[in-house]
Amino acid sequence: MTQRPAPYVLDPAARDADAEHELLRARGSATRIDILGVEAWSVTDPVLLKALLTSPHVSKDARRHWPGFDDAVRTWPLALWVAATNMFTAYGGDHRRLRRIVAPAFSARRVAALRPTVEGIVERLLDGMEAAAPGDVTDVRELFAYPLPIAVIGTLLGVPDGRAGEFRGLVNDVFATTLTPEEAAANTEQLYAMLDALVAAKRADPGEDMASVLIALGEEGADGRTLTEEELRDTLLLMINAGYETTVNLIDQAVTTLLTRPGQLAHVREGRASWADVVEETLRHSPPVKHLPLRYAVTDIPLPDGRTIAEGEAILASYAAANRHPGWHDDPDVFDVTRITKEHLAFGHGIHFCLGAALARMEAEIALGAFFGRFPDAELAPEGGDMRPVPSLISNGHRSLPVRLRP
Ligand code: HEM
């Protein structure tokens, strides 16, 4: 057997993600990495990545297809990413069943019906920010990018007003990759306690919301019971996790990019590009999710270069690195809202393609149009906050987004 080179150890704090992604691409279409002590294949070539994402020989079900599962659950800070039982970690028929239950809530019609709600939330948030005096520095991530998706997902799920924000710190820590296993386990415990409280409250007082609908599907004795108690809780967990941090990062990255590249904002203002173009180019250039843990080879998978991903080995979808692959886009590191082709993998690809993509796009388009309409002279104020990247290999945003709304 040939000796494998040592895996490249990813920086848990992702201090210089762009440089790290370049290095991963230079090591080949797929390369061995170590993510917080777990070895996996990081795939950065979009052609190979798409092939793996649509292959029936690649699973997200760690219980069934990953020999590392038991160890990871005990000692890996990202245990929750592989141990929860919902569509995100399901394979085959289980995945189809779990996705089908929730999918109708994200149809084009249902998303379009949410537009007035999103517009209302955006206006209310901007009204709140308007109070800032000229020259004041406002943290736009904290006061705008965060509360919007939190309010939207709260409305969708039926989390009572004012309680949705309670999940916020806990969700942040699901995406953090600098916690010890003990800290991560304590966070998971608190998150489940909050979900249990939500389920209990909805059981006692059901509404028309998604949480109530899912609870009804999971009731003992209900006709054609389709969700176990564990799946119910973990599906709510997924909706809350997926709906928060990702959309926050999209708005954060788009605002940051436009404030640092006035020429790009001018393209929109002068009609050469739309807000939808800004959203797509942001998703390509600075996707909210950098790496997505984890997938597993169900059988040996031969790679085009002669190597093999062996059965049971883990695969990391390195979406941010793939989006800037030089074989895919010209000048991939350049943010250009007028690019004809802005294809990306920010929402994944294949059967696990993000269920909330249309909702996230709508939220971001409305948010950006309204923000730059209300504050046309907004300026970035880096000295007034901490713009370092959040310490995460998954989440791709800034710790804060300091802006002078009215210089
Ligand atoms: C899955 C990205 C917003 C719900 C995913 C995946 C990614 C992703 C990368 C995993 C694909 C894979 O398996 O490799 C994003 C981004 C968002 C966003 C970048 C915002 C800009 C949302 C929102 C919701 C949502 C707002 C719902 C409220 C889901 C669900 C899945 C998922 C349910 C699991 C789908 C499955 O496994 O079949 N998303 N997401 N996402 N996302 Fe999103």
Image: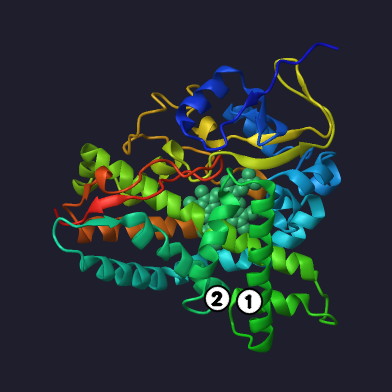
- Who's the residue at 85% across and 46% down the image? 64
**How crowded is the residue under tag 1: few (<14 C-alpha within 10 Å), some, or many (20+)?**
many
Residue 268, position as x, y percentages in the image:
25, 46
Q: Is residue 3 visible?
A: yes
Residue 123, position as x, y percentages in the image:
30, 70
Q: CA distance from mark 1 to mark 2?
A: 7 Å
Label 1 beta carbon within 8 A of ligand 1: no
- Who's the residue at 58% across and 28% down the image? 44
- Which element carries disc 2, helix, strand or loop? loop
Left or right: 258 in relation to 194: left
Task: Give the position of the N terminus as an image quadrant.
Answer: top right
Colour mode? rainbow
Residue 367, position as x, y percentages in the image:
34, 59
Left or right: 395 in relation to 141: right
Q: Is residue 355 visible?
A: no
- Who's the residue at 83% across and 37% down the image? 298
Task: Name the residue beneath numbered marker 1.
Answer: 198
Task: Name the residue beneath numbered marker 2.
Answer: 159
Residue 4, position as x, y percentages in the image:
75, 16
- Which element carries disc 1, helix, strand or loop? helix
Q: Nearer the viewer, residue 31 or 57?
A: 31
Image: 243 above or below 21: below
**How crowded is the residue under tag 2: few (<14 C-alpha within 10 Å), some, or many (20+)?**
many
Q: Amino acid at mark 1?
A: Leu
Looking at the image, do the residues carrying marks 1 and 2 touch, with CB atoms under 8 Å apart? yes
